Amino acid sequence: MKKLLFLMTTLMFVGSAIAKDRAVVAVLDFTNETRAHWWQTDVGRELGGMLANELVSTGAFKVVERNKLDSVLGEQDLGASGRVSKASAAKMGQVTGAQYLITGNVAAYDENTKGTGGGIGFKGISIGGKSSKAYLAIDLRVVNATTGEVEYVRTVEGHSKGGGMSLGFSRSGFGGSLGGHKKTPAGKAIRAALIEATDYLACVMYDQDSCMKEYRDKERERRKKSKSALSLD
């Protein structure tokens, strides 16, 4: 009996010792460099909230509650770029308990439409029912809240085509200003990009297994495609 208890205690100790710690992260409001028709004042906050929900769903992160983040975010002048200085990172980390700050910037958006039959209207915006493709690129940055150093950078792309979506399914819902875009090409591209972003972060910050090679290969392919679109001497 004593041997059994000793074995169980040992196994519990070993299990707890090798258990991975989940990083504590705070997700800031997204910024935008495009003329996307769906972007409004509060969309940056909504995208940040959606990314936070997706991160929680992976089980790889502890995410700071938005109200705790709001208590310090208003004091920091991040500017239109959303860039976080070393001093701002340290202040936000101290107040919220976050180890990392995650920022997202909508760097590119393109939507190809064919006609407007069967479309819908939303807040004065006409969205054609025959819109077939949308492309979205988000520049993702993970800042160490202690050092202010950028530890991870990734350009995440989301695509939608026809009635489908190129990446998986959404673990979080649309609301607010984005609520009317849930089933549009824009909404599907946003979902795809957020899912890819959270899967990437879970890989490099938590799993750290064979998935890292997969993402390195993806990044090489993305850069290769980008270069092929340019005429370089």
Image (cartoon, rainbow, N blue to C red):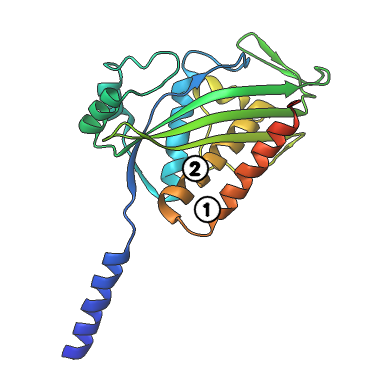
Q: Tell me: residue 152, above or below residue 124.
A: below
Residue at the spot 69% in from the left edge and 41% down from the top edge: 166
Image x and y of residue 215, in percent: 57, 48
The answer to whether residue 182 shows anywhere in this view is no
The answer to whether residue 34 shows anywhere in this view is yes
Residue farthest front in this picture:
233
How many residues crowd mark 2 within 10 Å: few (<14), some (14–19), many (20+)? Answer: many
Residue at the spot 56% in from the left edge and 42% down from the top edge: 196
Residue at the spot 30% in from the left edge and 21% down from the top edge: 73
Q: Which corner quadrant of the image does residue 10 belong to?
A: bottom left
Q: Secondary structure at mark 2?
A: helix
Residue 96 falls left or right of residue 180: left
213, 131: nearer the viewer: 213
Q: Which corner quadrant of the image does residue 96 belong to?
A: top left
Disc number placed over residue 139 in the picture, else none = none
Q: Write down the residue under mark 2.
A: 198
In front: label 1 or label 2: 1
Residue farthest left in this picture:
2
Residue 55 falls left or right of residue 117: left
Quarter of the C terminus within the rendering: top right
Disc 1 and disc 2 in contact, CB within 8 angstroms: no
Image x and y of residue 80, in percent: 44, 13
Image x and y of residue 119, in percent: 75, 19
Spatial CA distance of label 1 from label 2 is 13 Å
Residue 21 falls left or right of residue 162: left
Quarter of the N terminus within the rendering: bottom left
145, 24: nearer the viewer: 145
Image x and y of residue 27, in percent: 39, 32
59, 130: nearer the viewer: 59
How many residues crowd mark 1 within 10 Å: few (<14), some (14–19), many (20+)? Answer: some
Mark 2 is on which residue type?
A: Thr
Q: Write down the residue under mark 1.
A: 212
